[in-house]
């Protein structure tokens, strides 16, 4: 058994030497989310009112929980144990009083929360859509356990992590105001338990007026010289308390945590590793999860690497964050007028001047959910959302952005709607071959509330033969601002679009498949307002299938093999993982089924590579944009319907596939910086990446790579189906 953690520090010893009652919950292991990987037929979960453990069976494994609860899992309970039995046992007499009032509240709580149901599907929801990493806590616990076993089993082959134990001084700054003392002790202890030694903890009581809190802070400071206990005489707000703590801090980096949250034991070591190896790192952030009232972790937020546009959509940096001390002084510290969203305000200001923002793709922070906290109830602190909106509006004004902040798709998210500067002209380029009705419907939809004027439509006919198409062509001769170009010969999507682009003298080029219909108001404005920015190379739209499911919300490298659309198939009315499909954000690639590019940038890149006649031409173009220093944005505010692959098949796919892998194979084998290494690559819904999945995925890539051109497209197409990449419409992926 693991030793009782409360014995480590006398400051954390709760009153009383023994618990007054012991509660035991027995249920089958297959239904027990706390031990999902156990093979035994059933187990017993014991938990105790304070920190002291009562004797358990020799087979028991002690688990630890906060708020005075320590759990004991016993693999082999008495035979024929009921599915769920909750007993409250008097440790002095050994008598069992079922549902005793001593711990009745705990029994009710567990009955409500321990046996969590898997999220229910809507009646009309497709069965193939899965559960993402944030939606079902037992999946998270099981995934953690899988990785724990994997590291044990592969201890001899996994490279050792050489994390520092000493190095630059890190100052942890914690404003404190009337916390639960139990949670506060847990928070401080999580700092004391760090494997990294060179830290200081600056606590500032914001005029709580609580003698017990004052005494507790003083005891911590007396027990460890690295802990500084400060106080404001009167309540001044979280920013003033934080700034007071900053005055006492002397570390190279400031680490921000809340007074009831927890750091993982390696958190500071991993931050220090970045500080010592990345000289230009000024802001550091990590992944995080949440803690419920019995210290169970849930809802992990696995974040992408630094994305300035996602930060303008919502405060995604979250916890844990570390800022170079000198930079924090330079931007003026925390501002009381933004209390409630003071961290968001600081992050907006700090990242504006930071040389580099570094992401650590590992959960280093547990954000505690308590009654009245925004972590558990988004409606609990409406003033915090008002403050975050003001902080964003202040950033917009400070940066000189000509735009307005609007409410986003979900609470706490925002849409920065930018005004278009000048009157940039736009050419819409649409290749087609026959399918006259499809093309006509596409053209008609373009006229419905685009929100911005289309300068011209350029249609490229790749050898149409049907009489209906001849009729359409005659009609197009009288359509205003419409040009028709013939491109006879074999289908080459890249060459067709290059030829059309060469005839345009407009400022922007919108590449569009003929199986697209514009279905949202202001869709072109949403594309142009982002495409006008000089640092943006291309902008992609949100594409949906006719039944409302998502077809495109960005492309993730390595997903389902080579590259695929994230959230492809997401049912109508559902939100993707942490709202990624509902916010303007960066991706490594986009589909050119509807993609806007400034003409000067398109010409700088040399257009689409005509060595990709059918597929991967847009992905190749996007990757070249990224290498040239441009960013690519997805916007959900340009929503169009995509009928996908109605007018063209996959002939010629294998050569494109082989060429793409030969050029970009090394990049594909790396984790996509706009995704997260903890999220799975075989499915589009952002589930967990299981142990061994990287090796399995790599085997798929290596198995596809040696396929020689000419071996037959059917064999290659099978591999590509597994890879999850498709050709869209009369066009591209």
Image (spheres, rainbow, N blue to C red):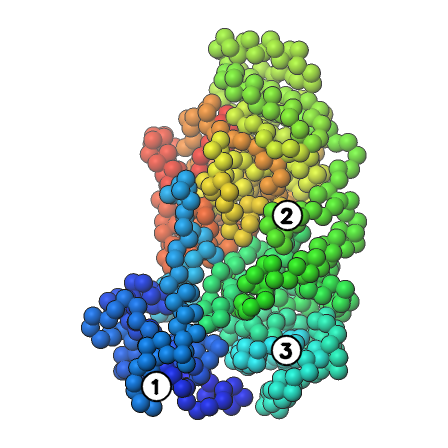
- Where residue 417 sits, quadrant-wise, is top right
- Where residue 54 sits, quadrant-wise, is bottom left
Q: Which mark is residue 178?
A: 3
29 to the left or right of 358: left
What secondary structure is found at the residue carrying circle 2? loop
Viewer-nearest residue: 103 or 583: 103
Pinpoint residue 544: horizontal percent, then vertical percent.
Answer: 52, 35
463 vs 178: above or below: above
Earlier-in-chain disc, 2 versus 1: 1
Q: Which residue is mark 1?
A: 90
What secondary structure is found at the residue carrying circle 3? loop
Which residue is painted at 45% across and 48% down in the image?
Answer: 685
Viewer-nearest residue: 447 or 574: 574
Pinpoint residue 692: horizontal percent, then vertical percent.
Answer: 36, 57
Pinpoint residue 242: horizontal percent, then vertical percent.
Answer: 70, 73
709 vs 284: above or below: above
Which residue is painted at 52% across and 58% down in the image?
Answer: 302
Which residue is painted at 59% across and 66% down in the image?
Answer: 373
Alpha carbon separation for disc pair 3 and 2: 33 Å
Alpha carbon separation for disc pair 2 and 1: 53 Å
Q: Residues within 10 Å of mark 1 (few under 14, many from 20)?
A: some
Viewer-nearest residue: 335 or 124: 124
Q: Which residue is mark 2?
A: 408
Earlier-in-chain disc, 1 versus 3: 1
Q: Residues within 10 Å of mark 2 (few under 14, many from 20)?
A: some
Earlier-in-chain disc, 3 versus 2: 3
Alpha carbon separation for disc pair 1 and 3: 33 Å
192 to the left or right of 100: right
272 vs 127: above or below: below
Judged by depth in the image, the label closer to the viewer, 2 or 1, is 1
Which residue is painted at 70% across and 57% down in the image?
Answer: 386
Pinpoint residue 269: horizontal percent, then vertical percent.
Answer: 55, 73
């Amino acid at each position: 058994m693991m030793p009782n953690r409360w014995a480590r520090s006398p400051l954390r010893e709760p009153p009383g030497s023994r618990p007054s009652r012991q509660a035991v919950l027995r249920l089958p292991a297959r239904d027990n989310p706390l031990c999902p990987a156990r093979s035994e037929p059933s187990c017993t979960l014991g938990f105790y009112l304070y920190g002291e453990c009562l004797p358990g069976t020799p087979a028991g494994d002690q688990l630890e929980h906060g708020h005075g609860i320590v759990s004991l899992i016993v693999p082999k309970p008495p035979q024929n144990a009921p599915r769920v039995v909750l007993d409250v046992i008097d440790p002095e007499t050994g008598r069992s009083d079922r549902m005793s009032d001593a711990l009745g509240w705990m029994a009710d709580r567990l009955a409500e929360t321990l046996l969590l149901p898997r999220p229910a599907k809507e009646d009309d929801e497709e069965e193939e859509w899965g559960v993402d990493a944030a939606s079902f806590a037992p999946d998270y616990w099981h995934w953690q356990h899988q990785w724990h076993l994997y590291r044990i089993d592969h201890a001899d082959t996994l490279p050792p992590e050489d994390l520092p134990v000493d190095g630059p001084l890190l100052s942890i700054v914690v404003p404190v105001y009337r916390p639960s003392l139990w949670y506060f002790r847990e928070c401080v202890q999580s700092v004391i338990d760090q494997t990294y030694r060179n830290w200081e903890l600056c606590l500032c009581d914001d005029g709580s007026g609580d003698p017990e809190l004052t005494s507790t802070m003083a005891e911590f400071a007396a027990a460890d010289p690295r802990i500084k206990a400060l106080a404001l005489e009167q309540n001044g707000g979280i920013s003033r308390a934080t700034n007071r703590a900053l005055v006492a801090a002397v570390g190279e980096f400031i680490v921000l945590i809340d007074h009831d949250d927890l750091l993982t034991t390696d958190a500071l070591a991993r931050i220090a590793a970045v500080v010592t190896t990345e000289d230009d790192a000024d802001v550091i952030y990590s992944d995080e999860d949440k803690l419920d009232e019995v210290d169970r972790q849930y809802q992990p937020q696995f974040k992408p690497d630094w994305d300035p546009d996602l930060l303008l959509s919502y405060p995604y940096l979250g916890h844990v964050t570390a800022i170079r001390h000198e930079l924090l002084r330079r931007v003026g510290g925390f501002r009381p007028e933004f209390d409630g969203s003071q961290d968001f305000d600081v992050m907006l200001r700090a990242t504006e001047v930071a040389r580099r923002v570094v992401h650590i793709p590992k959960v280093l922070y547990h954000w505690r959910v308590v009654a009245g906290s925004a972590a558990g109830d988004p409606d609990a602190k409406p003033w915090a959302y008002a403050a975050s909106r003001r902080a964003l509006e202040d950033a917009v004004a400070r940066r000189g952005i000509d735009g307005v902040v609007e409410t986003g798709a979900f609470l706490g998210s925002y849409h920065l709607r930018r005004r278009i500067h000048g009157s940039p002209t736009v050419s819409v380029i649409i290749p087609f071959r026959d399918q006259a009705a499809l093309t006509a419907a596409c053209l008609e939809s373009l006229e419905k509330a685009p929100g911005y004027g289309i300068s011209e439509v350029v249609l490229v006919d790749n050898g149409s033969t049907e009489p209906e198409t001849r009729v359409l062509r005659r009609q197009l001769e009288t359509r205003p601002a419409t040009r028709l170009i013939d491109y006879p010969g074999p289908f080459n999507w890249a060459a067709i679009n290059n030829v059309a682009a060469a005839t345009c003298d407009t400022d922007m080029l919108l590449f569009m498949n003929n199986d697209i219909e514009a279905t949202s108001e202001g869709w072109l404005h949403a594309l142009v307002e982002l495409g006008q920015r000089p640092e943006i190379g291309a902008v992609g739209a949100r594409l949906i299938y006719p039944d409302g499911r998502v077809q495109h919300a960005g492309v993730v490298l390595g997903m389902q093999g080579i590259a695929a659309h994230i959230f492809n198939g997401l049912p109508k009315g559902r939100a993707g993982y942490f709202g990624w499909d509902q916010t303007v954000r960066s991706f490594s690639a986009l589909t050119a089924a509807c993609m806007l590019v400034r003409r000067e940038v398109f010409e700088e890149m040399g257009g689409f590579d005509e060595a990709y006649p059918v597929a991967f031409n847009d992905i190749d173009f996007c990757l070249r944009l990224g290498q040239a220093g441009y960013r690519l944005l997805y916007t959900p505010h340009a929503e169009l319907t995509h009928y996908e692959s109605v007018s063209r098949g996959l002939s010629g796919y294998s050569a494109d596939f082989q060429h793409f892998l030969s050029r970009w194979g090394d990049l594909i084998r790396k984790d996509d910086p706009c995704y997260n290494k903890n999220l799975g690559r075989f499915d589009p819904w952002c589930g967990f990446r299981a142990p061994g999945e990287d090796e399995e995925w790599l085997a798929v890539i290596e198995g596809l790579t040696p396929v020689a051109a000419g071996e037959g497209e059917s064999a290659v197409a099978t591999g590509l189906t597994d890879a999850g990449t498709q050709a869209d419409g009369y066009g591209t992926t």
